[in-house]
Image (cartoon, rainbow, N blue to C red):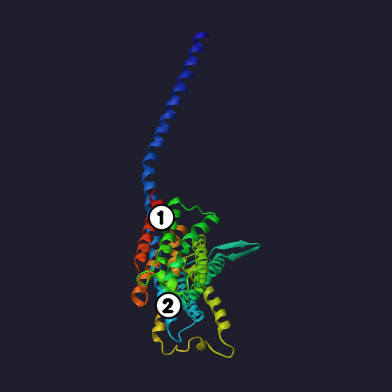
Amino acid sequence: MDSGLCRRQGSRFHVKIYSRITEVEETTTVAAPMEEVSTPAATQVESSGMRQFLQGNAYLLAVAILWGSYTPVLKILFNLEDGPTPELVAWIRGVLQATILGSILLSSNYLAKANSDDASPGGHTTQIGSFEVPTVLIGALEIGFYNCGATLLQTEGISMSGAIRAAFLIQATALWTPLLSTLLGERPALWQWVGSFIALCSALIVTLDQKMGGAGQAVLDSGGFPNTGDLYILGATVSYSLATVRIPSYAKNLSPLELAVGKSSVLALVASALLLYEIPQGGSIASLWPAYQEQMSAWGCLLWAAVFCGALTAFLHVKGQSLVSATEAQLVFSTVPLWSAIIAAIILPNEHLGPLTWLGGAMMIVAGIVSSKSKTQ
């Protein structure tokens, strides 16, 4: 009995040892390939993220340059004798922008349906109460409302202020954007906060430039800070920041072209309503631009503002922000005043760059570099 019991216990002991060895071998066999596969996968994800970051910033840099040309071009219009009113400029820009983008969207949808066998309607929807509402409609109304308010306020402000001054005042968005992002649940990185602070300081430095006809001199010449035009511009910064913060939430489910058409259409509708209000009783649109037949160069400025500063930037803005965060986008937009100052110095003979303007521009570039540390760490 004792020998039989020993043999049974010994066999059980060998079985336990064997099963233990088998488990270790299986664990080793399974774990080894995971180590080999994980490193290339992580590298691929990191490479893809950096590629999106660079592409998004390239789109937004193009937007910044085009936006930089917007203020000097509008200032040319408002410097004209018997030129167009701000309300008419906003209306022409809104209608042309919506028409161009709408035509492109219809053409692309037609080609997509022609090349697809699926004729069923698509598109994302959002549940509001008991109704299914197209997400593109909600996004168009919200982003369009912010964009429309910013465009109208900025256009009115530019008509009352210097081009370079207006361009640098719009940099108050550098502070509003991370604050609004935080309130809406996003967590900007520390370096993004630092970059935003540097960008805001750079704009303030430029307003102190009182030499060589710089932006600070424009502040003194127009009666100090702030004046009515300043308040319009600062109001526009809040609207622009709201649009910058909210666009990424819609860009995940909507194409850049759809969202650009939506917000441009809202601008066209609101600007049309304001235009009807501004037209004198019994008058016509021509009363808002008495010299519209003689000032052909002004039409070129309007086309530039509508096609390049309007339609093209509306698309590139949404496209870029579908790839980067709101705070990162804002830091690219911090270069807008630098482009405005350079372009204004070229096409506006009375606008010059002082030494502090160049210092502020250099600090904006530093702000972008500082912000990029959040992507490399």
Q: Is residue 43 above or below residue 126?
A: above
Residue drawn at point x = 34 percent, y = 71 percent: 212
Quadrant of res 206:
bottom left
Chain-order first, disc 2 or disc 1 = 2
Kind of residue indicated by mark 2:
Lys
Residue on which the image places disc 2: 75
Residue 221 left/right relative to 342: right
Q: Residue at x 56, y 69 (%)?
A: 141
Image quadrant where residue 194 sits: bottom left
- Image position, residue 8 (x, y; %): 50, 15
Kind of residue sitting beneath label 1: Ser
For label 2, the crowd category at 10 Å Cα-Cα, with few meaning under 14, some 14 to 19 and many 20 or more, is many
**Is residue 105 at all visible to an observer of this figure?**
yes
Name the disc covering residue 371, or none.
1
Q: Residue at x 40, y 55 (%)?
A: 371
Compared across the picture, whether 137 is left or right of 107 comes to right
Residue 119 point in image, percent of width and height: 51, 68
Q: Is residue 51 above or below residue 25?
A: below
Mark 1, Cα crowd under 10 Å, few <14 / some 14-19 / many 20+, is: many
Residue 162, horizontal then vertical, whole percent: 43, 74
Tell me how far mark 2 sits from mark 1, CA to CA.
32 Å
For this orientation, the residue located farthest to the right is: 130
